[in-house]
Each structure stands twice: as C-alpha cells, then as structure tokens.
Image (tube, grey):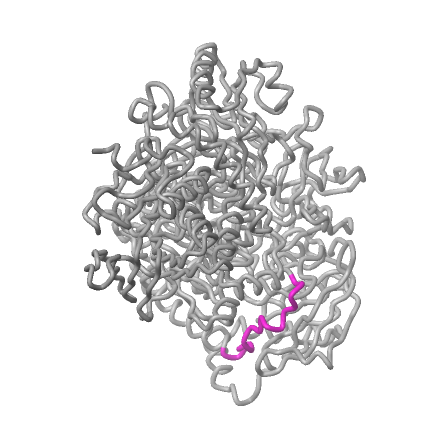
Amino acid sequence: MRLEHPSVRRDGAFIEITYDGERVPALAGETVAAALAAHGVAAYRHTRDGGRRGLYCGMGACFECLVTVDGKASQRACLTKVADGQTIRSQPPAGTPEDPLAPLVPPPQGKAPEERTLDLLVIGAGPAGLAAAEAAARRGADVVVLDERPQSGGQYFKPLAPSHRADRPTDRQFRAGLALVEAAKKAGAAIVQEATVWGAHAPDEVVAVVAGRETVYRPRRLVIASGAYERPAPFAGWTLPGVMTTGAGQTLARAYRVAPGRRVVVAGNGPLNLQLACELVQGGVEVVAVLESAPRPSPAQWRDLLKAVRSAPGLIGDGARYMLTLRRAGVPVLWSHGIVAATGRERLDHVRYAPLGADGAPRLAEAVTVPADALCLGYGFIPSTEIARALGCAHRLVDRHLGYLATETAVDGATSLPGVFAVGDGVDLGGSRVALARGTLAGIAAATQLGLADTHPEDSRRALADLKRADGFQAALWSIYRAPPVRLDAVPDDATLCRCEEVTFGRVRAEIAAGHDSLAALKRNTRLGMGRCQGRYCAATAALLLEQATGRPRAPDQYLAPRLPAKPTPAGAFAFEKPEWGGHQRAITPNLARPLEDGPLPDQEAEILIVGGGVVGACLAYYLTQAGRDVLVVERGDTNLQASGANAGSLHVQLLSFDFGARAEAGGGPAAATLTLGPRSVALWRELEKACGADFELAVTGGLMVADSPAGMEFLRAKAALERQYGVENAIIDAAELRRLAPALSDELVGAEYAPQEGKINPLRATYAVLEQARRQGARFLRGVNVTGIAAAPAVEGGGWRVETPRCRIRAKQIINASGPWARETGRLVGIDVPVHSAPLQMIVTEPAPKLVSQLVAHADRHLSLKQAVTGGLIIGGAWTAVFDPARRFNTVSRPSIEGNLWVARHVLPQVAGLHVVRAWAAMNINIDGAPILGPVPGLPGFFNTVTSNGFTLAPVVARMTADLLLDGRTDIDPTPFLIDRFR
C-alpha cells in the first residue's frame, strides 16, 4: 500500500522487478523492501528451521531482510535500490555451476587497497556526524563523512527517497535535515553514501568498502557518530514477517511513502510511536491501537511537564498534535500496555496485548487479541558502540531498559583514546538535539587539535547552551515516559532470544542452569551472538537474563568481545595477495582471564590437580576420573574460553605445509614424530563422542592439500612419502580427480594430496561435552582460580604438592600442567622451563553458504585452512598472525593477514567472493618445536606436562598418554619423542 500526501508526488519512473518469479511493480529510487511492502510482500529470507523472516530493523543492522539480487546473495532489501529487470529471490544461490554465488564486488585492483590521508574522518551522517563535519569543515579541516545509507540524515531525519519529490519540506524535521546536509556540504565536507565501514584497526586506520572496493582512511582525527538501533523486545512470535521496529515502519512511511501494512498496531515506549501512528493515519492506514508501556502522565508530574515545555516547546507541541490527530481518527492510545504475543503462519495476522502492572508483568487475564498484518515496536534504543569498543575506548554500563554499554566521553565527545571522538546516540541515548550539540562541540574540538583557528567562537557557546536545554528536556521526557522494568521472566521458553541463530529463551535458561553462566559461555554453547547481526539483537537481552538468573551484576568486560568487521562485509573486497611469512610470530603470554568469581574458597585437596580448563584439561579429567581417580581442575578464567574455545576445529592428520621442508620448526623432525598420533586421536574423538552421548559435529571427510604449480605437486609427493612411513593414509591426485572430489575448487589447481583420515569437529560442543562427562564421573572444576605458587610438600606431610592461589590453598599428590600457551608460566613455578611460546593467530568466518566443500582444505605453498561448518559458514584460517594489544590484554586481528588469508581462500575457492565475512577473531595458539610435550618431569616426582601445539586434534591422545603414564608408568605409544627431556 502506497501512502498519499498532498505535498509529495512520485518522481521515480515505474519499473518492474521479479520476486520469486512474480512480477512486482516498483518506483526507481526506492529500495527492494519498499517495493515489496507496497506490493504486500512481507516474507524474505528462509531460516535453517524452515521459517521465514521479513523486514525488521529497516536500517541494515539486523540482516533479516536478506534476498538474492541478480545472483548476489545476502543483499539487504532495506538498503538495496531497485533497478528495472532485477531478478530477486528469497533463497540464496545453490553454489553450483548452473547457479553460482555471484561475486558481490568487482575483483580488487592493484597490490593493496587505496589509502586516503585526511584531517578528519566522520563515521555516520546522522545529526551528530553531520554537525561535527560541518563544524570542522567550517574551520578549514579536510573532512570526509562515511555513511552506509543511500541518503544522509540518519534514523532521525530520514530524508525523502529519490523515488519521490516534495515541492517543499512537509514538516520541520524534514526541513532541518535537508538544511544540515546542505550546510555540511557547503562547508566543504565530502559525504560518501553507501560506504560500509569494516571497522577501525587503529584511530588512523579505518577500513571501509566504498563503491565495492576496500579503502583505508588515515585520518589525523576520528569522530564516531554511528547512531543507535532499536532495542529488541522479545515475545512469542516477534520474528514473524510483519513484525518490525518503529524505525523500520517510519522509514517506509516517511522516506518511501509506503505503509508497513493495512492494519497496524504500534507498541513501545516514547513519543516516536505516536509520530509513526499519526503519519500512518494521515496516509490512510488503519492503526488498530497504540500501546504505551509507561503509565499515563499524571498531574503529579507537573514539574517534569513544565520543564519539558520550557526546554522544547516545539516538541511538546508536536506531541499534543499527535494525540489530537489520533483521537480524532478514533485510534486508542493505551497506557501501561504491552505486547504478549504475535501469531500467524507465513506472516503476522494477529497481535495479543495486555495491561502491564507496575512491576512490568502483563495481566494475562485481561489480554486482548486483534487482527493485524503489521506490528511496529519502538521500546528504545541501544548505541552502536562496535567501532569504539574495537578501538579500545572506555565504556560503562547504563542500566536502562535492557541495559547497554555507553562510550565514556567528555562534553565535546573526546574518548579515552587521544584523537578519537564519539558523539550522538552511538555513544549514549540523548536524542537528536543532544546529538547536534555534541556533534558541533566535537567538530570544533577536533579542528582545534588539528591546529585550526576557531573562526566562529560563538558556535561553542551556542552548542553548550543547546546541550543544556536538550539534556534537561531528555531528563524530563523520560521521567514522564518512565516504563516499568523489563520482565524477561514473562517471556515463554519457546520464544526466540537470538534471531540469527534461532536460540530460544528455554535453551539459554537451560544452559545457565547447567553452569554456563557468562555471555562468552552462552555464545560457545548455543551460538548466541554468532550470526550476521553479531549480537546486536540478543546480547543485551542475554546479559540481563544472566543477571536476573545469577544475581551477578553485569560488567562491561563481561559483554561479548568486539569483533571486526563491524558489520558483514564482502569477502572479495579484501582479497589482496601478501607475502608468505616464515613462521609463527611469537609473543608474550599475558593473563587474558576475566574471571567471573574472585571470592575466597575453602582450601582444597585432590589426588590429582590439573592446571588448565581447556580441551586438554577436559580430556585429562575424563580419562583420570574414568580410572576412578580424584581429580580437581582449576582454571583462572572460565573453562574453554581461551585457546581451546577460540579454535577453528580442524582435525589434522597430514603435515601442514609449514611443518615439512625448509619452513618446518627444528628441521621438521618433531612434527614428523607426531604423525602417528593424529589418526589415533581422531579415533579417540569418535570414542569420546559416543561416550558423552553428544553430537560433536565430527565428520571425517578427508583432507585436501592443493597445489597450483608443478613445484607444489613435487612438494606434496615428497611430503606424502614421508607421511606414509608413519602410517598416514594418503594419495596424490590429479586435477580431474580433484574436480570430482571438490568441484567448487578453482580450475587453476593442478592436483592435491588427499588424506582420507582428516576431518573437522565443533570445538565448542566437543570440549563442553567432555567437561560435562568428566564432571559426571566425579571431576571437580574451579574457575577463577589462578595458580601463583607450587611447592613440594615435605615427606612428613605425606609428600605431594602445596599449591597457592589468591582464593584458596590446594594440596595434591600429583599435578598436571595443562596450561596451554601459559604452560611455561606454570612450569616456572616449579623451577623448570617448558619451552612453549605463544603465537596469536586469527581466523575468519563467512555467512552461511550452500554446500561448497566437504573436505578440510589446505595449500601446499600458502597458509590456508578452509572448511565448511555444519551451519554453512566457511571457516578460513591457516596460521595467519594476529596482534596482541597489551593495553587491553586482548588479541586482535591484523588487516594485512585478513587480506592475505582471503586472497588465498578466494584463489582456492572462487565462490568465496560471493560471500560476506561475518566476523574475524584472534586466539592464542601454542608454538613448540612441532611436537607436544607430555609426561613426567625428571627430578620432580608427581609433576607432569601435557601441552601440544596441534591442541584440538591431539588433545585426546596426549591426554590418554599422560593418563597412562601417570596411572601405570607406561603407554602403548612410545612417548620418548614427546618428553621434556628432548630439550636438555
């Protein structure tokens, strides 16, 4: 349904697109979402469980409205403009030769991305970003503004799309937005639309995709004005097509003159919902009701009402006119009401709502069900702090509605990082007038730091005065609109919490009850926050649910770690060939733990103490408790959250290319000695999967190490011959056989080594399942326990070991050092050197793809590890180095490594260019000499090591061998090549 307005006329030409084979009329200049909504289409992408999703956020943050446009997968319908003759599908391409994933962007040109040096870069062209750009440019700064949307203005101004024209602005909001954009341009700021910011690796290294190409901006100063997105308000049925945010409904109505539906319910908290309802009524839409969660304003609030009127009389006047318009149209405004459920099959058809008590609980006995084909939800906002957090700016927790992280800033937007400013609702929620004032102050401050004269000193005084009034108005407004507390306990178990990964409230509640009571543990156990929206629409809800369930207050450092890209970005844009490096870049091994618990514990006793709660510690606990031993595992952070929990899940049997030949550690001998362990360990993983009664997503699909040159094939033949001497099954195959096994791989490949015993595993499911089975067998686990001292106990006390920690003392007869990258630190406590080094490495994962490759894929001459997970995403790695940030005690990704890794991946699997990168992460890998260190330590009876650089593949076998040596003094595999003695 298209909306009519006496001052607005259609300006775009009538064109035609097809959607799932049906012809759909459209207007040039509008988005796919607007055209489909005008045609009555609400259902877009298909979920893994067979459901459908529709337009939700309307601003490109939720990735629910994905469609395939002319073969290009995962295009956001809310941002993608229509073109005559477009073929649009709700399903992604099949990834076959007949229906391939079309490249999302042109192939990169040159050897490196374009770089641009400038005075000031502004991220975001909403009120705050435009104000900052205008203020700095007026003072002579070279300013560029990057904005993801087709038009400037942000969520607030929402300019009219090119599909329509107005002879004059239809209201004050449109007029102010147009004036601000024009002022910024007139001052000299360059505004780049449809620019997707990957993120910032440093304040002077901001990466974006502009016109399909990677561009690196090197600003002397940076202003982050990334705005906010509407907070989730989960209930049964909130993922149905037809349920969307108020912002999405308003974008359709204001920018594209399209109704979100014919019978619309508007619900939430705040006056924005009244504005939308009013605009829909004026356009001829039937608004069933407006549900406001706050109580009706009372005379007792006269002070706040008076303050609001004095601070912003125009806005209060707008609100009064909204109420009058709705009353005249017969639209009920129901105070202290909220949504209970949305129902429908293919799309929304009914809404159920009820009055709310003062405690926020719905009075279900008074619930009402009404027919509706659209439900617009506006319950408040959450700042988009992803880029500021990735840079390391300080943040604080704001306990408002669900709670959110806000960037700590000075009045002029200066953050804790020199030269970085953050303003607008992307910092903290304050509305457009606060954003305008703070944006102006930030632009002036940035220009001053750049050494530019303040040619308009009155601007600062005016902005400070405006800020004071706007802050006062916001305080009064939200006192009037004070909503009851969020009651997540009222959300049923079958309601969805994580939209992307389809994780229900019941699943999350069960995981919390099982002891997985941190956001990081929930993420690893359920995939919550791993989808395309990257936790925007679930993390705050899950954090509040955790606090309500555990009583443990939320804290900024316990939120999901910031990951780049800030939003999914075309993989092909970043594929630049890089030199192959010569080996792991060793780093210090910092304490990365962020313990959830730090209170005192009773002193502990155990027969066997295992130091380290990763995959090796879990397997040790399993085998030792299986033998009836008393086992205590201590972990200074939380179990499975460091190297093991960030593993990519490859099951390697053949040697990696850098473990053979000239590039190998210690000449390759130690790595070759491990070849006998790989097949045994994969078999043990299968036994563990059966014993634990859990699905590890373990698949032995074979491994392919591919070559693209005769020299590469010769390298593979020599490597395969050595591997066969150690019992590894393999075969050298030619290009034709390679095509038969993996037809999606590049035609440029000339052959491969095929190792049928290789495969993949879900490292998150597997480790947690083994931990739980060990616990069932009697193992005890203590988290947040950092071992700081180890001393031999005197014989009169029975021998063994005394262990000191800040929380308790521990007595143990035997100790196993399973500290992974931190094994050297643990060894020093008993006076030995365990020659383990840390090597921060990074991995990349794409969005879900059609089935492209079954095998574990590596390259003979290049660093590559590539596999496709059960969820469909491609996991891309291969030991490309990451960077340790000592200021934050955090490993972070490296742009050159991202570019080089994606180049190799695209070279081997061309359809990578048709996918988006969802996230990249860094982890702490272990670097020894190519072989594990296990077994007893001479001169230290009762002290054992169990550390391996191929940790996930070999974890069961090295744990089994250590357990055998501890229990029986022998093992059926010769441990000699793996004992610490070899380093003496």
Where does the image place residue 320, in percent across and percent down from the top left? Answer: 61, 76
Q: Work out which residue is located at the far bottom of the displayed protein and give it.
A: 300
Where does the image place residue 732, in percent across and percent down from the top left? Answer: 53, 15
Place residue 23 in its image quadrant.
Answer: top right
Q: Nearer the viewer, residue 880 or 369?
A: 880
**Which quarter of the figure is the C terminus placed in?**
top left
Q: Work out which residue is located at the far top of the displayed protein and give it.
A: 710
Looking at the picture, does residue 126 appear above or below residue 913? below
Where does the image place residue 978, in percent across and percent down from the top left? Answer: 33, 34
Horizontal side of residue 657 vs 529, given as left or right:
left
**Residue drawn at the location 34% of the way across and 56% of the way down:** 609
Looking at the picture, does residue 810 appear above or below residue 957? below
Report if residue 442 is visible in the image: no
Q: Is residue 159 magenta?
A: no
Where does the image place residue 331, in percent across and percent down from the top left? Answer: 73, 73
The residue stretch that appears in magenta: 479-495
Q: Nearer the viewer, residue 129 or 833?
A: 833
Name the chief secondary structure element in magenta: loop
Horizontal side of residue 734 vs 122, given as left or right:
right
Report if residue 550 is visible in the image: yes
Q: Nearer the viewer, residue 547 or 318?
A: 547
**Residue drawn at the location 36% of the way across and 49% of the way down:** 391
